[in-house]
Amino acid sequence: MNLLYYLPWLSAVLVMASVIVAVQSFTKDNRLKAAQYCFYGATAVIGLMLVALTIAFVRNSFQFSYVYHYSSVDLPLVYRIAAVWAGQEGSFLLWTFFVMVTVVLSLRYETQYAKSFLTLAGLVTLIFIIHSLHNNP
């Protein structure tokens, strides 16, 4: 089985762990860093998925149905890269990545709302990832 099949599941597990640990951090302050590290890992996995999908488009890897449906050998390179977000699945993957990067950048600032923010952002991201699990490009 293809390793890329498991990456969305890994990101879902990491975001769920981040949400659970963030909720636990309301009672134990030392758990917030662990929740942040889980979220950082999930962001890296989503970024890896986006890079892998882009490479599949650049190399014309038509064994992936998403690449087969949204690309062509005749397309110039810039259009093949843009085809990554041509379909719904790629768009959700790209938006998930943007949301997660925004959360990671926001977590650099220690505020009193960091626990609530990470919990809510983790739940929103989890919804995006669950949608991506259902429609895996």
Image (tube, rainbow, N blue to C red):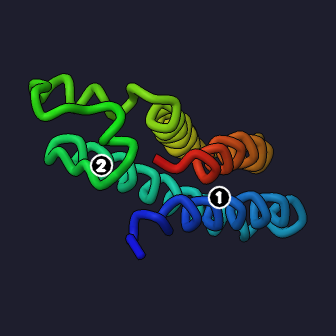
The location of residue 17, given as percent across then percent down, is 70, 67
Query: Is label 2 in contact with label 1 (beta carbons under 8 Å)?
Result: no
Residue at point 50% right, 68% down?
6
Which residue ends up furthest to the bottom in the rendered image?
1
Q: Residue furthest right?
A: 27
Q: What kind of element bears circle 2?
A: helix
| Marker disc for residue 55 | none
The answer to which image quadrant residue 96 occupies is top right
Q: Is residue 82 above or below residue 90?
A: above
Q: Nearer the viewer, mark 2 or mark 1?
A: 2
Q: 24 or 123: which is nearer to us? A: 123
Residue 22: where, in percent of width, then height?
A: 76, 59
Residue underneath mark 1 = 15
Question: Nearer the N terminus, badge 2 or badge 1?
Answer: 1
Picture residue at 25% right of the left edge, 48% below the top: 62
Q: Is residue 55 left or right of residue 36?
A: left
Which residue is disc 2 drawn over? Answer: 51
Q: Nearer the viewer, residue 9 or 111?
A: 9
- C-alpha separation, residue under disc 2 versus residue under disc 1: 19 Å
Q: Dot 1: what SS?
A: helix
Amino acid beneath label 1:
Val
Characterize the local packing of mark 1: few (<14), some (14-19) or many (20 or more) Cα atoms within 10 angstroms.
many
Q: Amino acid at mark 2?
A: Val
Q: Does the rendering let one see residue 112? A: no
Give the residue at x 76% y 49%: 119
Instruction: Inspect this view and state whether residue 13 appears.
Output: yes
Quadrant the N terminus occupies: bottom left
Q: Seen in the image, is 6 located left or right of residue 30? A: left
Q: Nearer the viewer, residue 135 or 129?
A: 135
- Report x, y in % for residue 54: 27, 43
